[in-house]
Image: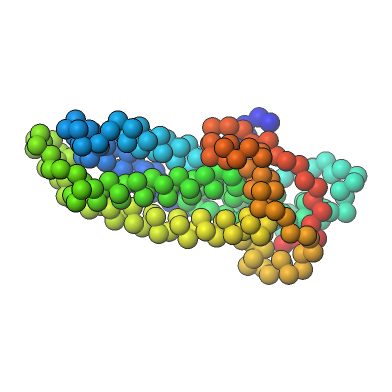
């Protein structure tokens, strides 16, 4: 499956995504300079702590960029409908195109998306069948990076020994208190917001329902047997290898499941 780039022209989405990139860039640049490298030079922390911070930061930005440009599951103009699945397709009353059931028409993007969960301005893209796994990774690594940053901010003042060799001529040390206060403030906001979002996403996968289905209350009309959580997660991530659920550098190969779910959104 080749990489398909999906770019949404939306100034509001660009601003939201720019804010996320600013927070990531701010912490990735200043936290190592103020905390990790100085404390490593004086033997207060290990090189593993620095490596882990940059690794989590890398996974976070990769999942963000990939989720924002990945095709969420946009339907082609003339989809080829298998004969065995025609009864599981329907006509969209907005774009007059055939689509699998459980698809939804995104008014902001202007097209239907397979198993659409919601349109997220923070990635300037829809969250659908083909990029839902990247959105989950983004939520996970954002929580991890925010928590790691908050822990380092706390340890810098209340756990690590005071730094003996500080070059006060450098900008980061002259304005250290202000920079770390801003880092802490952004970390708390990001961790609080993403934690709630990540929880609702996990609950949706456990129950095999999307946010749109929850809001439209159509789940009560859907008659399907419950699935084990391993199966629902494997369908989202495109693999049964759980270690691969955490890797944003791979290509997702969908576990093709017939669109046999009843009642559309």
Is any part of residue 264 visible from this angle?
yes
Q: Could you tell me which quadrant the N terminus lies in?
A: top right
Q: Is residue 93 visible?
A: no
**Image location (x, y in percent) of residue 137:** 52, 44
Which corner quadrant of the image does residue 49 belong to?
Answer: top left
Name above or below for residue 263 compared with residue 260. Answer: below
Question: x%, y% of residue 102?
Answer: 73, 56
Give 108 or 236, whichever is nearer the viewer: 236
Comparing 46 with 65, the one in front is 46
Residue at point 29%, 56% (across, down): 185
Q: Is residue 99 above or below residue 240?
A: below
Quadrant of the image containing the C terminus: bottom right
Q: Residue at position x 53%, y 36% from top?
A: 248
Q: Residue shown at 68%/70% (left/top)?
A: 217
Residue 72 lies, in percent from the top left, at 63, 45
- Front residue of 162 and 139: 162
Residue 80 falls in image quadrant:
top right
Q: Position of residue 55 (x, y in %)?
A: 40, 34
Q: Answer with left or right where residue 235 lies relative to residue 101.
A: left
253 on left or right of 249:
right
**70 vs 262: above or below:** above
Residue found at x 79% / y 60%: 224
């Amino acid at each position: 499956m080749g990489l398909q780039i999906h770019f949404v022209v939306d100034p509001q989405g660009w601003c939201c995504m720019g804010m996320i990139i600013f927070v990531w860039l701010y912490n990735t640049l200043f936290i190592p300079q103020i905390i990790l490298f100085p404390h490593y030079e004086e033997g207060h922390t290990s090189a593993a702590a620095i490596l882990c911070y940059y690794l989590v930061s890398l996974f976070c930005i990769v999942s963000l960029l990939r989720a924002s440009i990945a095709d969420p599951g946009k339907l082609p103009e003339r989809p080829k409908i298998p004969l065995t699945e025609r009864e599981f397709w329907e006509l969209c009353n907005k774009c007059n195109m055939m689509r699998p059931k459980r698809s939804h028409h995104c008014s902001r993007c202007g097209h239907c998306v397979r198993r659409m969960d919601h349109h997220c301005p923070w990635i300037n893209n829809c969250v659908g069948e083909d990029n839902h796994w990247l959105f989950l990774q983004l939520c996970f690594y954002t929580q991890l990076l925010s928590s790691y940053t908050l822990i380092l901010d706390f340890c810098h003042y209340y756990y690590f020994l005071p730094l003996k060799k500080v070059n006060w001529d450098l900008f980061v040390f002259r304005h250290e208190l202000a920079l770390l206060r801003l880092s802490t403030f952004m970390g708390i906001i990001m961790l609080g917001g993403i934690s709630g979002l990540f929880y609702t996403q996990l609950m949706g996968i456990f129950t095999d329902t999307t946010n749109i289905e929850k809001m439209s209350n159509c789940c009560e009309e859907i008659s399907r047997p419950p699935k084990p959580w391993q199966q629902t997660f494997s369908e989202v991530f495109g693999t049964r290898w759980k270690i691969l659920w955490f890797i944003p550098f791979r290509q997702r190969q969908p576990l093709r499941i017939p669109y046999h779910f009843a009642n559309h959104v």
